[in-house]
Amino acid sequence: MSTYVYGIAARSHPALSEGLAGVGDPPRPLRVLTEGDLVAVVSDAPDELRPKRRELLAHQNVLAETGADGCVLPMRFGSVAPDDDTVIDVLAERSEHYRERLEALDGKVEYNVKASHVQDAVLHQVMADSAELRALAEANRRAGGGTYEQRLRLGEVVAGAVRAREAEDAAEVRQALRPLATAAGVGPESTGWLANVSFLVERDGAAAFLEAAEKLRKARPHLDVRVNGPLPPYSFVEPGPSAPAGDPGSG
């Protein structure tokens, strides 16, 4: 039977809440694997695990419940090891790393911030900022819309200005929020977002962080700033352990 891994904690972490269960249908009972001064919160892995809402919520609930009592290194959904012995071996091999991460992440949460442009607003912004753009647009207007070449030229200049603005705004998002976090990591690029950044924030500093994000949103109406959190610090468990396929430390 494969082993599903939810998170890693110190051996001194309080016992699991009675009745707490994990993924699967029916939900699999949780258990704790111990190696030295570390433990892994695990369950049997379902034969077929899919990222359905019910399963994602079950994974998150285990981390929320266990993380409420102390620091837990969260594994990402779908972290499966071949068996319990593999998990115990990884705990032993990576014990120094996990102890350091538990200490570093204690009392901290993750906020993921994504930002994109409000199209009409950013076009207005780049036009207001560029005399060249205004002159090109005015020339086209006077020419009844302009020739194909003139319209193409205007479109190219606008696109270039928007790209430059994306880079500037992405840097501004990071600069506005980074001082309020103990660490930050840039997430993978994806269509539609000019910034995708995860911030590690002290629980006690969460209100100030959210206030700064709201201030940024109000000051830059051409930006759509979305904050997701507080989350378990998924983005700050890395680097993960070098373990077999199905590595429980790949979170």
Image (spheres, rainbow, N blue to C red):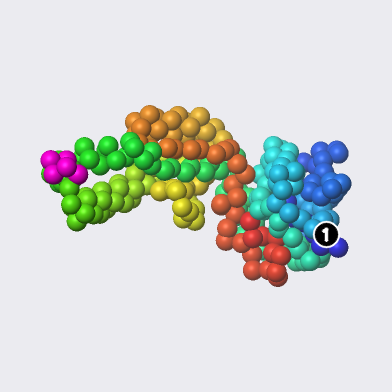
Give the camera-side residue of 203 and 127. 127
Asked if residue 120 is positioned above or below residue 6 in the image, the reply reads above
Give the magenta range.
141-145
Q: Is residue 227 magenta?
A: no
Relative to 200, is 127 on the left or the right?
left
- Seen at 82% across and 56% down, the residue is 46
In-front residue for pair 240/224: 224
Main SS class of the magenta portion in the image: loop
The image shows residue 88 at horizontal and vertical percentages of: 77, 62
Q: Residue furthest front?
A: 144
Return the x and y of residue 31 as percentages of the image width and height. Answer: 84, 50
Mark 1, Cα crowd under 10 Å, few <14 / some 14-19 / many 20+, is: few
Q: Is residue 242 visible?
A: yes
Q: Secondary structure at mark 1?
A: loop
Seen at 48% across and 38% down, the residue is 226
Q: Is residue 150 left or right of residue 1?
A: left
Q: Which residue is mark 1?
A: 47
Quadrant, the N terminus: bottom right
- Does residue 182 show up? no
